[in-house]
């Protein structure tokens, strides 16, 4: 046993070590502070001593302030996403339930099924590292290297790939029925906020990414269903729209982690994700050998969206003039999945007219939205100011066939945008080409953007007997469009199995050009030229499994196996509710559901007495008739009170927004002096009668049967829905000039708690106004 003095000595030695360590830490810390302060004062002294401009001192300080602010904002965002991604979904819903009434379709058994799926993902995550490593090295690395070369940054390479211990999380699973019986479609909310770390080198500089965050709506399509295990022939995995992506930079790249510079890096990462798996791009996984790989990897599009951005009105003023706020220099960016178009900039106006037209290939009808973002172009360094955004539901456009309306801008104090959207089906008959070419010529007269009459799908299967063991890839040209396959390494008989889709202006005058090129030497191994007019004479406008000889190949033995499918665009007709698109059977999460609701099939007329009468056509003009005849024919064309009727579409979406479309009014009474009214529609969401609650349509001059087709929205939490009433007033602009009579011509009150999703568009009788606000 140790003696007492020895114990005391040991304790004293430990205390001395602790004190010494604490002193060392303290000394190091304060020496760092002293050196930093000394360096800062030395800089200030040097700037003054050498008469250097004060701007050189303020520039780095401004840089550091912006960088610190951005870092704090990103940390808050990352913590929120990470807490959602790692928390139990049942706990999340219990917290939400404390503050709002959850929809009836969200149940805890559903959450338990989703949690079971996430447990499987956590179990498999440790085995996913090798797959992610190969995906980054052989798929992502070449794509990013090519993208960075445009910015004169060469030699991109992954140095370290650490996947981390935190897996991604799935929630809000929705399964569709009424699809083909040979496929299963599932939508899920995807969230990843893990501890992965990627280190890369670019032009001999090393940098890295950590705290990667990805969140978005992801779709899994299981097709085709087969009669052998695993019962599913393949999977298609893709994001419906561009996901939200953010990350922190480490190493040398940390210097660029501030607005403007880091946005370039972020856009490259988002672009690569979109290129891989944002519609119309998909990530296919083949599970069974004997299936149609062309159908799995490059299915036929559902159709084409032709969009016209006509004009905008009353945009926010962002430019500062000599006398205060000036106007704006607005432009509009349109997005559908990975596809993007941009209008020209109209200078110095808040009421721009673009007359811009473009076309989107559309692969998914349900749950995809067409986004419009408006910006004020800023010629100085920095991001352009946002003027607002709007969106249209693709399914509603598909259902209506053609939509032409004003859409109010969200995330803005004022403004709306006038758009027209037309759905084009794909047709297999050559006889429909002439009609589409006529439509294109008529539209082309008002826009400089090229429009198209057909869609060409090209499937590059494989090549045979190429020369000199090349690293081959295939380049395809249609008009001004050019696309390429990935490079196959060191082979004379490459298998590509890649598909591409092109929009064609006129198949009678255009041709398809295909080149097989050696990536190492850039030598063209052979060419194919196909006149698209030939496809118009083929059955179903297609050529399948054709081995085309490659012209220009030495020896003349090289061939390329190709599928060609031509489809003619055809303007779609209005569809019934039950046609086509799949219906959801199990829903466990919010879904983007901002819908532009259009009247479908029959129209229900609701009177104040809640009597519903169905009629197949819009209300007829009033005619002389006795009361018995009117009673047999249906409701009075002028309404129960003789004030007219209004057609409205009202729907509450899972995104917690109340959407109202004011379609038209019929049979408004004339003034006592026989003068026609100048009517407009004014909305309030009672009990709030403030300026924020007020919405107004345009004024239609001198009309008793005005048509508006204008859409409005209110952000409204679910638990507040039953406490709200939508007040719809029809106001005569002329009546505002006379104090002796009320300007309100009629009114409709709708209890928001009694809205019926099955009866979105209805006719309502106008009643005398009970409450009027001051104009």
Image (cartoon, helix red, strand yellow):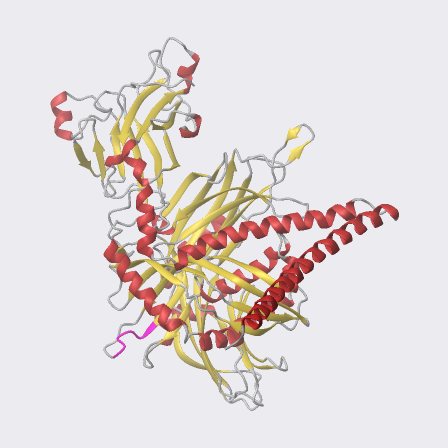
Q: Nearer the viewer, residue 562 or 722?
A: 722
Let me know if residue 535 is in the magenta part. no
Which quadrant of the figure contains the C terminus?
top left
Task: Read off the magenta span.
Answer: 229-234
Residue 218 image position (x, y, % from top left)? 39, 60
Q: Single out the residue that lies furthest toward the top.
A: 740
Looking at the image, which residue sits at the far right? Answer: 50
Q: How many marks?
A: 0
Q: Nearer the viewer, residue 287 or 83?
A: 83
Query: Which percent across, then down, holds residue 374?
Result: 53, 44
Side (left or right) of 329 relative to 56: left
x and y, in percent, of residue 641 in the image: 23, 20
Left or right for 615, reference 689:
left
- Which residue occupies 50% across, 67% down? 196
Does residue 233 belong to the magenta stretch? yes
Front-most of residues 698 and 594: 594
Query: In the picture, residue 774 is in which quadrant?
Result: top left
Which residue does the image show at 85% across and 45% down from the upper left?
48
Would residue 300 be found to the left or right of residue 20 on screen? left
Q: Nearer the viewer, residue 516 or 54?
A: 54
Q: Residue at x 43, y 29 (%)?
A: 692
Q: State whether residue 80 is above or below residue 219.
A: above
Task: Kindly indicate the quadrant of the structure image that contains residue 378.
Answer: top right
Residue 446 visible in rendering? no
Q: Is residue 734 positioned above or below 598 on the image?
A: above
- What secondary structure do most residues of the magenta stretch adopt? loop
Residue 737 position, x and y percent, is: 44, 13
* Quadrant assignment, res 100: top left
């Amino acid at each position: 046993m140790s003696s007492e003095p020895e114990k005391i000595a040991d304790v004293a030695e430990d205390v001395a070590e602790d004190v010494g360590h604490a002193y060392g830490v303290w000394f190091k810390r304060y020496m760092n502070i002293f050196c930093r302060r000394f360096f800062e004062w030395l800089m200030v002294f040097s700037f003054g001593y050498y008469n250097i401009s004060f701007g050189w001192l303020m520039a780095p300080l401004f840089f550091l302030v912006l960088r610190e602010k951005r870092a704090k904002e990103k940390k808050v965002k990352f913590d929120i996403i990470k807490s959602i991604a790692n928390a139990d979904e049942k706990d999340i819903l219990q917290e939400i339930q404390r503050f709002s009434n959850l929809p009836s379709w969200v149940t805890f058994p559903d959450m338990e099924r989703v949690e079971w799926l996430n447990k499987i993902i956590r179990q498999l995550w440790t085995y996913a590292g090798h797959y992610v490593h190969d995906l980054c090295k052989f798929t992502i690395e070449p794509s990013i290297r090519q993208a960075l070369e445009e910015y004169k940054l060469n030699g991109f390479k992954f140095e370290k790939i650490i996947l981390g211990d935190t897996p991604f999380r799935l929630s809000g699973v929705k399964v569709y029925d009424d699809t083909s019986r040979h496929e299963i479609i599932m939508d899920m909310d995807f969230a990843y906020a893990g501890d992965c770390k990627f280190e890369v080198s670019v032009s001999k500089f090393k940098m890295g990414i950590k705290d990667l965050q990805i969140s978005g709506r992801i779709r899994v399509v299981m097709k085709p269903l087969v009669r052998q295990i695993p019962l599913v022939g393949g999977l298609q995995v893709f994001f419906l729209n561009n996901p939200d992506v953010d990350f922190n930079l480490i190493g040398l790249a940390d210097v660029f982690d501030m607005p403007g510079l880091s946005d370039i890096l972020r856009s490259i990462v988002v672009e690569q994700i979109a290129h891989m798996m944002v519609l119309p791009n998909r990530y296919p996984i083949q599970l069974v050998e004997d299936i149609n790989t062309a159908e799995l990897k490059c299915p036929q599009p559902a159709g084409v969206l032709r969009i016209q951005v006509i004009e905008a009105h009353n945009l926010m003023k962002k430019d500062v003039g000599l006398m205060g706020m000036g106007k704006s220099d607005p432009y509009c960016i349109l997005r559908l999945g990975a596809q993007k178009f941009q209008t020209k900039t109209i200078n110095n106006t808040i009421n721009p007219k673009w007359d811009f037209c473009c076309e989107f290939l559309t692969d998914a009808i349900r749950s995809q939205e067409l986004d419009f973002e408006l910006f004020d172009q800023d010629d100085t360094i920095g991001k352009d100011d946002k003027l607002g955004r709007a969106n249209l539901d693709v399914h509603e456009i598909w259902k209506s066939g053609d939509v032409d309306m004003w859409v109010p801008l969200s995330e803005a104090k004022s403004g709306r945008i006038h758009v027209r959207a037309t759905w084009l089906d794909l047709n297999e008959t050559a006889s429909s080409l002439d009609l589409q070419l006529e439509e294109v010529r008529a539209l082309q007269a008002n826009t400089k953007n090229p429009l198209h009459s057909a869609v060409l799908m090209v499937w590059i299967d494989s090549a045979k007997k190429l020369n000199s063991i090349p690293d081959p890839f295939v380049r395809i040209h249609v008009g001004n469009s050019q696309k390429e396959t990935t490079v196959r390494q060191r082979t004379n008989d490459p298998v590509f199995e890649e598909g591409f889709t092109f929009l064609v202006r006129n198949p009678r005058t255009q041709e398809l050009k295909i080149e097989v090129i050696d990536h190492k030497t850039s030598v063209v191994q052979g060419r194919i030229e196909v006149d698209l007019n030939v496809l118009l004479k083929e059955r179903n406008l297609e050529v399948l499994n054709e081995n085309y000889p490659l012209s220009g190949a030495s020896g003349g033995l090289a061939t390329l196996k190709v599928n060609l499918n031509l489809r003619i665009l055809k303007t779609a007709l209005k569809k019934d509710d039950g046609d086509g698109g799949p219906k959801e059977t199990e829903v466990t999460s919010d879904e983007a559901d901002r819908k532009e609701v259009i009247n479908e099939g029959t129209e229900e007329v609701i009177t104040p007495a809640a009597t519903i009468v169905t009629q197949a056509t819009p209300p007829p003009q009033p005619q002389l008739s006795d009361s018995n005849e009117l009673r047999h024919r249906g409701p009075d064309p002028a309404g129960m009170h003789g004030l007219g009727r209004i057609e409205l579409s009202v729907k509450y979406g899972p995104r917690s927004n109340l959407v109202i479309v004011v379609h038209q009014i019929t049979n408004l009474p004339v003034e006592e002096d026989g003068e026609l009214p100048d009517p407009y529609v004014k909305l309030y969401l009672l009990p709030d009668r403030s300026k924020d609650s007020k919405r107004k349509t345009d004024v239609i001059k001198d009309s008793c049967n005005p048509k508006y087709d204008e859409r409005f929205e209110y952000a409204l939490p679910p638990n507040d829905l039953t406490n709200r009433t939508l007040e719809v007033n029809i106001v005569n602009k002329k009546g505002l000039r006379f104090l002796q009579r009320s300007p309100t011509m009629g009114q409709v009150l709708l209890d928001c708690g009694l809205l019926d999703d099955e009866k979105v568009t209805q006719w309502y009788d106008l009643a005398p106004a009970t409450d009027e606000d001051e104009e």
